[in-house]
Structure formats: structure tokens, C-alpha cells
Image: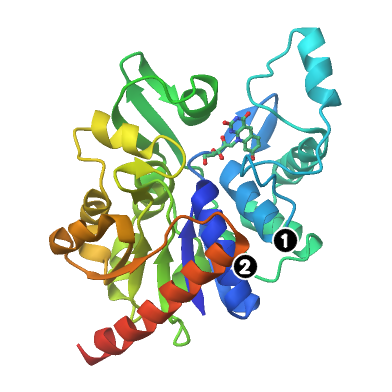
Amino acid sequence: MIVALSGGVGGAKLALGLSRVMPPEELVVVVNTGDDFEHLGLSISPDIDTVTYTLSGLANRELGWGRHDETWSFMETMESLGGDTWFRLGDRDIALHVERTRRLHKGETLSAVTADLCQRLGIKSRVVPMSDDPVRTRLRTAEGWLDFQEYFVHRRCEPVVHELLFQGAGAARAHPEFLAALTDPSLQAIVICPSNPFISVEPILAIPGVRQALIDSPAPVIAVSPIIAGQAVKGPTAKMMTELGMDPSAGTVAQRYRDLLDGYVIDHADMSEVVSIDARVTLAQTLMRTMEDREALARTVIEAAAILRRRKASR
Ligand code: FO1
């Protein structure tokens, strides 16, 4: 069994690679829900949808979010009605949000709805929200506090970020399937995917008990850097690091995970960072353009974890 902590597009890509190079039913993808929000009366869980669309082959490959087989009549009509169209919702995607909202309002948990959705999409891996309790990422910017999607989509990540807050994290309970996986004797590795550490991974780590459970797990924790040569592969990671007073580097991300990491996978371009990283470093091609890239990086992570597992067990 492998547990992968994922949020956003980069995380979903590696999760897909993992699901193709191991028995998919042995993969548990724990997904960030800090990006979730209510919009147009709908409960939207973007990182869960990015993972499920990606694992089921439905994802829009260029954008990384939404579906590839999309039409936009709903958005066009909303535009003509003067409604909110800054958050693009395709006609097929909308059906998912409407149905999830109905089931949540009926009292079902987010994880129950997600499990059913995965089953309907033929996904063999388990996709588990980090918690069924609400956690909302908010950002203190030069223009005041912004909700996550307002910052990320509506404002296109332009405002300068001074602080992040994971509202509700302190009262949230890690999903029981997540915690159970961390103590499962068959657990081979805990993979922190190449997601933005601030907005995709740290909301998960902010839930009480999660960091300690990762440290206590007999399985090695191995992260893949989301930064290559000082640049984020996608999204505002490097910009955020600079605005938060950090050097946008693979080494800085390792610092964020400090006490957790047994292993760290960085790109060949960042070889000079190796000396500054207090974990067992593996150099790889971490930019995933093709399916082969996704699978090759996944294999590298699994192989590195196997070496680390022997070391952690003998400690
Ligand atoms: N991201 C955008 O940059 N623009 C959008 O209009 C947009 C719509 C959208 C709809 C559904 C969904 O599941 C995700 C969507 N995303 C959009 C991506 C989303 O904001 C991000 O993927 C996460 O919240 C951060 O990784």
C-alpha cells in the first residue's frame, strides 16, 4: 500500500503515475480540501475533482482541471444573465457539483460521496479527503484576507501574500481511512506529491495529529519537489515563497517538511541543492509532460522508498 498526499494538478499527475505502476487498489490518495468553496450555491471540491478526473482519464490535459469533453452552454447563459463566470464551470462538470451538493445537503459525508463517484468513474485507487470536517484556506494579502479561489482564480494569484490561514484545521479530524493507512503493516511509503507546499500540502499537515502520525509511521515519508531550478512547474508556489520571504528553491520546500522527510526527490537541475537537504536525496526528471514521465517518476519514488523503508525499519 502507498499513501500519496495530493492537491492540485502536480499532485494528481504523480498520483496517476503511481496508479499505473502499482496495483491501483493499493494506492490511497489523501486529498487537500482547503480549496473547497461554496459558489453559485454549489459545494465545489476542486482538488478532489482534479484527482478523480485525472485518475479516470477525464481530465483536461492542458488545464489540469475540469474535463476534456466539455461544453460551455451553462457559462455562456450565465454570462448573458450577468451572473458570476470567473470560475469556469463546464456543463458536464456542473452535474458533478450539483449532485455532490445535493448529497452533502442530505447529510452524506464528502468522503462517502467521493468514494461513490470514484466507483462510478471506474477508479480502483482510493481517493480520500484529508478530513470530512471543513477546512478553508484563506490568505492575508496586501488587499486584506481573501478566500482561496478568490485569490487563486478570480485574482489570478496577483495579490501579494503575507500569511496563510487554514480555517477550521485545528478542529478538523483527519479522515479515519487516512490515519488507518498510516499504521497499516502493508504500507510501503507515504508520498508527498509535487504540490504547492503552502496551499496543497500544509492544510493536510495542519490537521492535529497528522504530522506526528507521519513521523510515527513505520513507512518512509518521501516528497517530490514542486520547484525546479527556482521555478514552480505550475501555479504560484515560487511567487508565494518569495512573498513570504523564502528563497524559491527545492531546498526551501524540504525545510517546510523538515521533521517529516526521510527522502526527497529533486530534479537533476537542482543537484546543487543536495548538500542543503537533510534527507536522502534522489535526483530524477521531475517535470512530468508525458504519461511515461509520470510513470518513471512514480517508479523512482517507489524504489527510493524501498531503500528508505529498510533504513527506517533498522533504526
Ligand atoms: N482554475 C482556474 O484557474 N480557473 C478556473 O476557472 C477554474 C475552474 C475550476 C472548476 C472546477 C474545478 O474543479 C477546478 C477549477 N479550477 C480553475 C482549478 C482550481 O481552482 C485549482 O485546481 C485548485 O483549487 C488549486 O489547485
Residue 129 is left or right of residue 211, and the answer is right
Q: Which residue is mark 2?
A: 126
Residue 144 drawn at (x, y percent): 35, 16
> The C terminus appears in which quarter of the rendering?
bottom left
Nearer to me, 251 or 216: 251
Determine whether the residue tagged by mark 2 lies in a helix, strand or loop.
strand
Residue 113 placement: quadrant: bottom right
Crowding at label 2, few (<14), some or many (≥20) Cα neighbours within 10 Å?
many
Residue 255 drawn at (x, y percent): 20, 54
Determine whether the residue tagged by mark 1 lies in a helix, strand or loop.
helix
Residue 306 placement: quadrant: bottom left
Nearer to me, 301 or 287: 287
Amino acid type, mark 2:
Arg
**Residue farthest to the bottom, as pictured:** 314
Residue 14 is left or right of residue 127, and the answer is left
Separation of disc 2 and disc 1 at Cα? 8 Å
Q: Which residue is mark 1?
A: 118
Residue 10 drawn at (x, y percent): 50, 51
Whether disc 2's CB lies below 8 Å from ligand 1 is answered: no
Residue 262 placement: quadrant: bottom left
> Do callouts 2 and 1 mark residues in contact (Cβ within 8 Å)?
yes
Q: Could you tell me which residue is drawn at 73 percent across and 12 percent down? A: 83
Q: Could you tell me which residue is drawn at 68 percent across and 27 percent down? A: 88
Q: Is residue 51 above or below residue 64?
A: below
Q: Is residue 12 above or below residue 233?
A: below
Q: Could you tell me which residue is drawn at 70 percent across and 49 percent down? A: 59
Q: Is residue 22 above or below residue 191?
A: below
Whether disc 1's CB lies below 8 Å from ligand 1 is answered: no
Q: Is residue 129 visible?
A: no
Q: Could you tell me which residue is drawn at 61 percent across and 44 percent down? A: 64
Earlier along the polypeptide chain: callout 2 or callout 1?
A: 1
